Image (spheres, rainbow, N blue to C red):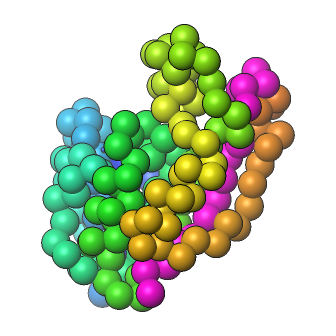
Amino acid sequence: MTVLDLGSGAGFDCFLAAKKVGKSGKVIGVDMTPQMIKKAKENAKKYDYKNVEFRLGDIEKLPIENKSVDVIISNCVINLSPNKSEVFKESFRVLKNDGKIFISDMVLLKELSKIHKQDNDLISSCIAGAILKKEYLKLMKNAGFEVEILSEDKEISERQYKGFPVESIKLVAYKK
Ligand SMILES: C[S@@+](CC[C@H](N)C(=O)[O-])C[C@H]1O[C@@H](n2cnc3c(N)ncnc32)[C@H](O)[C@@H]1O
């Protein structure tokens, strides 16, 4: 099985996936930050993961062949993308038929003010780049996915985000 991680950071989710797919499988991590790719490659070497590859690239234009991936995973990344529609279209393109994408991400429950939307600290803390949940789900459906929500954590707003109207959502979406 081939697994793709969108926005792989230091590579830890790729390493968890690598254990699941075993020696006959493969995991590819894509990240647009050269420093994170370097870090992830160092970690792969340090922990001796041979079935993981890291590629520098933008998740809005994935450096991945059509219909070559069984499962996509992504944790707290898509909110950072200014063009989420392209991320979902690209994900659909690279998945094999019957493939699926598991996402954990932040979505808005209410629109933010223009000032908050442009606040760099809020963007980097995964709030200001987020879009409304219903828009997010619509973009996924428009890309061709059948979406199933697995869980929603609204308490994270008070716990971690000073009451900003956000929630953490976990979902699976199918390419049928
Ligand atoms: C909050 S970190 C999450 C990293 C990892 N998924 C994790 O859970 O540890 C966000 C990562 O996404 C990457 N990223 C953000 N926007 C991206 C884009 N458009 N294309 C590729 N990588 C992106 C960043 O460089 C960063 O490594």
Q: In this view, does 62 lie to the left or right of 114?
A: left
Of residue 31 and residue 111, the one placed in the foreground of this image is 111
Quarter of the rendered image showing ligand 1: top left
State the image coordinates of residue 134 (x, y, percent, origin top left).
62, 52
State the image coordinates of residue 12 (x, y, percent, origin top left).
45, 53
Q: Residue visible at 54% across and 37% down?
A: 130
Residue 25 in sight in this render: no
Residue 165 in sight in this render: yes
Figure quadrant of residue 29:
bottom left
In the rendered view of the protein, which quadrant contains the C terminus?
Answer: bottom left
Q: Residue visible at 35% across and 87% down?
A: 97
State the image coordinates of residue 68 (x, y, percent, origin top left).
24, 79
Q: Residue visible at 31% across and 83% down?
A: 96
Figure quadrant of residue 50:
bottom left
State the image coordinates of residue 28 (x, y, percent, origin top left).
28, 64
Q: Residue visible at 56% across and 50% down?
A: 135
Which stretch appears magenta?
A: 160-176
In the rendered view of the protein, which quadrant contains the N terminus?
Answer: bottom left
